[in-house]
């Protein structure tokens, strides 16, 4: 996300004191704007308590000499990454003059990921190494839990020696109504059917265009947030299309007990949903002439299919795709064959884990093609991986074994921006 996009996600805070006059500062690192909702609640509670509070993005980290408290609210994005707008915040912290202010870090993430709150942990380590004191030790909030945030607020109030009531209300982005125009159904494996759902792209009227309310220009690999009618928490699905395609397409597996997946699977053409776009800049793929390795399994192929669909420049894209059974869950099969004919896809390597002679899992396909993969990486190939976390771990292990013979690793590719995962 660019700096101006990140700024657009930020709420307008009442009583946002100038930094130089503030006794308390709040710095926020948020990829999609959700962490700003927590910052807004903290800001309001501290102002209510009589503090002069200034809130800003973490990229603006600087502490005036008279400030007494600093709070850093940091979300971890992707595989332990900083939100894009705060990518250089650690370097800024390393250069900032140390004052007597106490700097407290609160992390936001999801425990299902191995890098849970890893960016907040990196900030905590950098601040303590520099010599900044803390009012509270690092705390971590799982899946934007309002309850955990309230408990942290109670601890903060005790540490400050004053009552502090954090009234956080989840911020739901403005939604747009989408109409389902077609669906492709698959029996799926393990009793979980799936469907490719295509929604009509909303046409912006003249009023929408002049007021800026038309839909953003999204890319394949960005996320569609779907709001079920019962008001449950939005569910995010990777997009298999971009704004240039003129439609919004996702691939959804129906989970047992899944509120949103059950809702979507019950829709028929003509039905309408409320949805919003959430950028996913660390995973989306920019136009390139370099080789691209796309690795996915199951419904994780959706954004990879979107990358191939948008490959009008015919960059050499190679898809390694694993499913259980081609008769049950070979999503986008006809599209992939057509894209091969159109040379949008250079090669397709499939593995079917539940059929005789199916070739095992997608990581087995990588190992069978090890020599070719090493050549592609040597040519500067970009790698995108999408699917379950277990699949992504297996893929990373397989690639480490393949690349280790030439002195490379997945971590090195990540460090150079050539490897990104989108897991669930």
Image (spheres, helix red, strand yellow):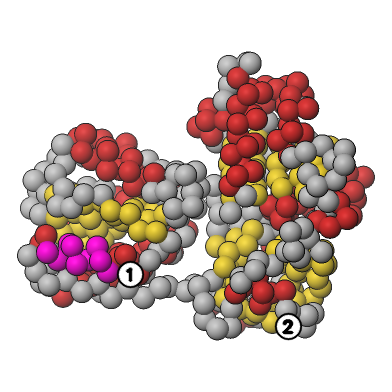
* Quarter location, residue 188: bottom right
Could you say which is closer to the camera, residue 120 or residue 218? 120
Residue at horizontal 67%, vertical 59%? 239
Image quarter where the C terminus lies is bottom right
Q: Secondary structure under badge 2?
A: loop
371 in the magenta segment: no
Residue 314, position as x, y percentages in the image: 81, 41
* Numbered disc in front, either 2 or 1: 1
Locate residue 328 relative to residue 62 in the image: left or right: right
Residue 240, position as x, y percentages in the image: 71, 58
Query: Is residue 92 visible from the viewing direction of this image?
Result: no
Q: Secondary structure under badge 1?
A: helix
Residue 230, position as x, y percentages in the image: 55, 83
Write down the residue under mark 1. Answer: 147
Q: Are marks 2 and 1 in contact (CB under 8 Å)?
A: no
Write down the residue under mark 2. Answer: 271
């Amino acid at each position: 996300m660019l700096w101006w996009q990140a700024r657009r996600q930020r709420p307008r805070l009442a009583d946002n004191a100038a930094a130089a006059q503030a006794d308390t500062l709040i710095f926020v690192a948020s990829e999609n704007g959700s962490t700003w909702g927590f910052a807004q609640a903290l800001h309001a509670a501290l102002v209510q308590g009589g503090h002069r509070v200034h809130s800003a993005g973490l990229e603006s980290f600087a502490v005036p000499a008279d400030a007494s408290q600093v709070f850093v609210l940091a979300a971890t994005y992707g595989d332990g990454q900083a939100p894009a707008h705060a990518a250089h915040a650690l370097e800024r912290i390393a250069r900032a003059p140390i004052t007597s202010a106490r700097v407290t870090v609160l992390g936001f993430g999801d425990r299902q990921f191995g890098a849970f709150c890893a960016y907040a942990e990196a900030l905590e380590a950098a601040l303590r190494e520099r010599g900044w004191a803390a009012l509270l030790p690092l705390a971590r909030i799982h899946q934007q839990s309002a309850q955990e945030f309230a408990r942290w607020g109670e601890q903060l109030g005790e540490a400050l020696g004053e009552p502090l009531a954090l009234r956080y209300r989840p911020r739901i982005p403005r939604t747009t109504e989408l109409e389902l125009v077609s669906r492709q159904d698959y029996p799926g494996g393990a009793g979980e059917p799936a469907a490719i759902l295509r929604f009509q792209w909303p046409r912006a009227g003249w009023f929408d265009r002049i007021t800026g309310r038309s839909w953003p220009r999204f890319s394949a690999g960005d996320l569609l947030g779907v709001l079920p009618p019962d008001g449950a928490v939005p569910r995010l699905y990777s997009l298999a299309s971009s704004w240039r395609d003129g439609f919004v397409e996702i691939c959804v597996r129906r989970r047992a007990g899944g509120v949103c997946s059950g809702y979507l699977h019950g829709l028929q053409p003509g039905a309408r949903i409320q949805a919003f776009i959430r950028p996913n800049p660390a995973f989306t793929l920019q136009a390139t002439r370099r080789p691209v390795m796309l690795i996915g399994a199951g419904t994780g192929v959706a954004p990879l299919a979107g990358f191939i669909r948008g490959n009008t420049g015919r960059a050499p894209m190679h898809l390694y795709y694993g499913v259980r059974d081609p008769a049950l869950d070979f999503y986008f099969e006809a599209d992939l064959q057509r894209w091969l004919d159109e040379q949008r896809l250079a090669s397709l390597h499939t593995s079917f884990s539940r059929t005789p002679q199916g070739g095992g899992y997608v990581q087995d396909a990588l190992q069978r093609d090890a020599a070719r993969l090493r050549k592609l990486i040597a040519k500067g190939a970009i790698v995108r991986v999408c699917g379950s976390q277990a699949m992504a771990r297996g893929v990373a292990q397989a690639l480490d074994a393949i690349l280790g013979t030439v002195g490379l690793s997945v971590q090195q590719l990540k460090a150079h921006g050539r490897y990104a995962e989108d897991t669930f």
